Image (tube, helix red, strand yellow):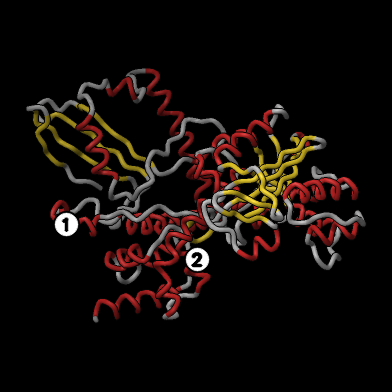
Amino acid sequence: MGLGKSAEVADHMIALQPKFKNTDFHLNSCLGHCSMMGVETGKVIDYSVRSKTCKICENAERKNTPPAPHECTRNWTGSSKSMEPDMIVEMVGRTLEKGVNKKISIFPGTYTRRLADLKDRINRRKKAMSISKEAKRKRLHLKAERKQMTAAREIREGPTYCSEIALQTSTGIGEIPPPLSKPSFQPIENLGIYHHVYFDLETTGLARSSHITQIAAVCGSDRFSKYILPKIPITDKATEVTGLRVIDGKMFHDDKEVDAVHLVAIVDALLNFFTKFQSKVVLVGHNVKSFDCHIFRNSLPNCGKTQEIGNFVAGFVDTKQLFKVFDSKVGSFSLENLYKRYVCEPYKAHDALEDVLALQKLVTSVGVDLSDPKYLSSSFTFSNAVDSHSYNLEVRKNLPLLEHLISEKIVSRHIANRIAGSGHCFSCLQLVYNRDSKDGIYNLFSENVKKAPRVTKSLKICSSLNTYFSSSCES
């Protein structure tokens, strides 16, 4: 479906003819093409194609594997409606003389007929396969998926092509951010090829926004331990546990002054420590997945060392998760309790260096092989840590703007966390409702992200939000 349009470009009259394959009233098409022709000569000046599908990529996505190297046909992720203006802008901006026949490999004569015969045979095979019930059921399923995806993209994009669009306010044409998904932790493959560095932090408190006060790492007889001057006060509870305090810009451990410098210098020293292993390392820590990893990752952007650390660190192993697999009958999985149970010796806890020495001795004493496949679930990659950090930052940024929806019991805190993590703030929800007060929020929340809805498919939750915004508009 398409309408011819005339325009004047570079003092020449041209005609623009957009087409969409297998479209209905909603322009729900996976493929669109547009030709630019001279009105007087009838010659094709330029053409453009937009495709939302690629069989190889789609098969790889269904199998959750990277696609094989190929010439991908997918070059469009927006809605079908927005294909047309994008193609026109592209063609007008390009040089007019393109040599269209060479670009699309169409030549007259024998080769054209041979190609036509081949295409006919392929089409006959496809038609024979397409009449089965399974094929029809699959087509209906894919059509429903595309329809839902198109609705979600259109509600995110807002109006892209309509009469007097330039006169609309910026609020009406603002684009909602693409979906984010909560990262899933992937185990480290071939864990045995990396050096295992035991790692621990002491911090200013228990919050994930706490600053590091001490960092220690041990691999065999190689040791690293440094104190760091934090930029925020150390809580009384942390001082009671670790014995660390800062007085007049100087750090004291158990009332003895220690050498402490700022974070940037410590990270540089840690990178220098990693270089001696001549390969990537895996940081092994106790409860690192829930605490140390987040504190460590939070500190890296402050000194601009995320990329450098990623070049040396393959990932993390959480020994607390590992010992839950090793011996699930232990009452407490704290490092002190495990060390007392298996090593039967006392040690000075809550000192980063003493903790990593104790952890290394504990793992060695019980004979745990970190590379054993049954312990894979206790490991995760550095890229997982980066993605998790980005997701948590998004939640931390958007969740405060949704607190009144929680307090008024419009949504639960769990759903509010999912809304915030998917990239939505309150103004995004208001904008979606203004664009489509009936189905806008449902279409956005149910957008498919990694085979799961962006937020939820619950009609009850979407209806509750619609009612809230409706009453707000009336008042």
Q: Residue 366's x, y, as percent?
A: 90, 50
Q: Residues within 10 Å of mark 2 (few under 14, many from 20)?
A: many
User: With respect to residue 323, does 199 lie above or below?
Assistant: above
- Location of the C terminus (image quadrant): bottom left
The quadrant where residue 8 appears? top left
Q: Residue 324's x, y, as percent?
A: 80, 59
Q: Residue 95's x, y, as percent?
A: 22, 24
Q: Residue furthest left?
A: 11
| Point 55% across, 47% down: residue | 299
| Point 10% across, 27% down: residue | 10
The residue type indicated by label 2 comes to Asn
Q: Which mark is residue 168?
A: 1
The residue type indicated by label 1 comes to Gln
| Near-viewer residue (438 or 302) | 302
Q: Which mark is residue 261?
A: none
In this rendering, the count of numbered labels is: 2
The quadrant where residue 308 appears? top right
Q: Which mark is residue 417?
A: 2
Marked residue nearer the N-terminal end (1 or 2): 1
Give the alpha-carbon distance from disc 1 to disc 2, as whole Å: 32 Å
Q: Secondary structure at mark 1?
A: loop
User: With respect to residue 278, does 392 lie above or below?
Assistant: below
Q: Residue 353's x, y, as percent?
A: 75, 46
| Near-viewer residue (45 or 298) | 298
| Near-viewer residue (196 or 139) | 196
| Point 70% across, 50% down: residue | 256
Mark 1–mark 2 CB contact (< 8 Å): no
Q: Residues within 10 Å of mark 1 (few under 14, many from 20)?
A: few
Q: Residue furthest right?
A: 344
